[in-house]
Amino acid sequence: MWAIVIFIVTYLGVAIGRIPYLLLDRTGIALLGAIAMVVGGSVALDRAVASIDFPTIILLYALMIVSAQLRLGGFYTRVAQGIAVLCLHPRTFLLICMTVSALLSALLANDIVCLAFTPVLAYALMGAGMNPIPFLIGLAVASNIGSAATIIGNPQNMLIGQLGHLAFGAFLAWCTPPVIAAFAGAYAIIVWIYRGRWTAPTPAPREERRRYWPLFNPWQSGKGLVAVCVLVALFFTSIPREFSALAIAGLLLCSRKMQSRHIIALVDWYLLTLFCALFVVIEGISAVHLPEQLVGYLAGQGIDIQHPLVLTGVSTLLSNIVSNVPATMLLVRFLDAARPEQWYLLALSSTFAGNLITIGSIANLIVIEQAADCGIAIDFKTHAKVGLAVTAWSLLVLAAWIYI
């Protein structure tokens, strides 16, 4: 009973984002839940450690190192500035911005892409007298959709790929067609919603922000790009993905110009902590067989959670209640390892669902927070106008793909 209470309180806290009278964020709430599971005796300490899927954590950590190399080398800044010169041609600029965001997010962490691109694009758009909101929303939407195409595109895909023992090439082949269709629809939706509203008076951008943009270094950026190419090639081999990623990350740390502490400082320790804590929390409810009881109850009502449309609906709902990473960690326990299509479906549905509302994915929150730092307000309603339509289209594409 104690484990069930901890689970409910933890997931409610993660959904709301805070606990009244306490300055806890989602990661802090999840960590507190994990601590309560261990201290309260629901999960023994050795079981808590064993419940953490370290290959997934290692893969995520190593890919953050690779992304940090590119960020410190100024690669993201250079790309963003390169495409920003087209901002006076809004439809073309939106298409290029979304395409670059989607492609980079498929190969690198989408959160890093949004973190690096948002301030540079905001500065260029405001300086040109353009309305930055459709472009920044397009950046977030495209990064979410594009990241769904590969196992390494976002944290929940990495988890799904590792636990489901999915082949990189097979995952890419199955997920790419619906991703392309969803992307095309998302672009058309944003163009239609913001037709005639591409320009708007905006406050002057703050010059001091430019000091924090890493300068472009061809050598360091080149190292990062070579590392990405080698890594993707290794992912098509039988070498465990976490070993390949860790080896490449180790080589990048061996630098004569870039201090390792600067690279490691860009690792998202909060996300890694969130992952570890949620593994422990879910282990606690597994010990009392709560997931099995819930699935059994649904089955008694004629609802099969492994049915493609049911899985898509449940994934979409949970992803917008507790965000897609916690939702994925809960739902993977109900998938059949012998049916990879279920795993592909969860990856696509949980990622597409991230576009629905602002808390659906970390990428959305990053863009909104970075935009606010630049004096641009993107509220829940503004995002939802695009997010609802884009998510509905994406899920329609996914449903059609299931039956094709």
Image (cartoon, rainbow, N blue to C red):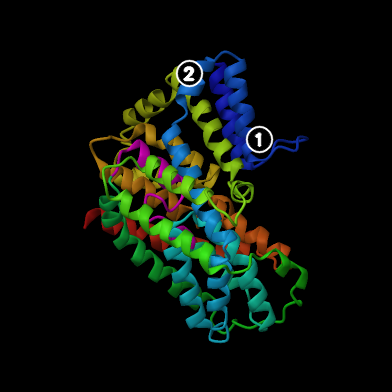
Where residue 121 appears, as percent x and y from the top left, is 61, 72
Q: Quadrant of the N terminus?
A: top right
Residue 222 within the magenta-colored segment of the rendering: no
Marks 2 and 1, Cα distance to the nearest angstrom? Answer: 21 Å
Relative to 381, say whether 321 is above or below: above
Q: Residue at x 46, y 38 (%)?
A: 58
Q: Which mark is residue 28?
A: 1
Regarding residue 134, the answer to whether it shows in the image is yes
Q: Is residue 186 left or right of residue 275?
A: left
- Circle 2: residue type: Arg
Which residue occupies the foreground of this view, 30 or 242? 242
Q: Secondary structure at mark 2?
A: helix
Which residue occupies the foreground of this view, 266 or 393? 266
Q: Is residue 89 left or right of residue 187?
A: right
Residue 160 within the magenta-colored segment of the rendering: yes
Where residue 133 appears, as percent x and y from the top left, is 61, 71
Q: Residue at x 44, y 64 (%)?
A: 102
Where residue 253 appears, as percent x and y from the top left, is 53, 48
Q: Residue at x 63, y 51 (%)?
A: 262
User: What is the crowding at mark 1: few (fewer than 14 residues within 10 Å), some, or many (at least 20)?
Assistant: many
Quarter occupied by residue 129: bottom right
Relative to 113, say whether 320 is above or below: above
Q: Secondary structure at mark 1?
A: helix
Region rendered in magenta: 143-166
Q: Residue furthest front?
A: 256
Earlier in the chain: of badge 2 and badge 1, it is 1
- Circle 1: residue type: Gly
Q: Which mark is residue 47?
A: 2
Where residue 307 appears, as percent x and y from the top left, is 29, 41
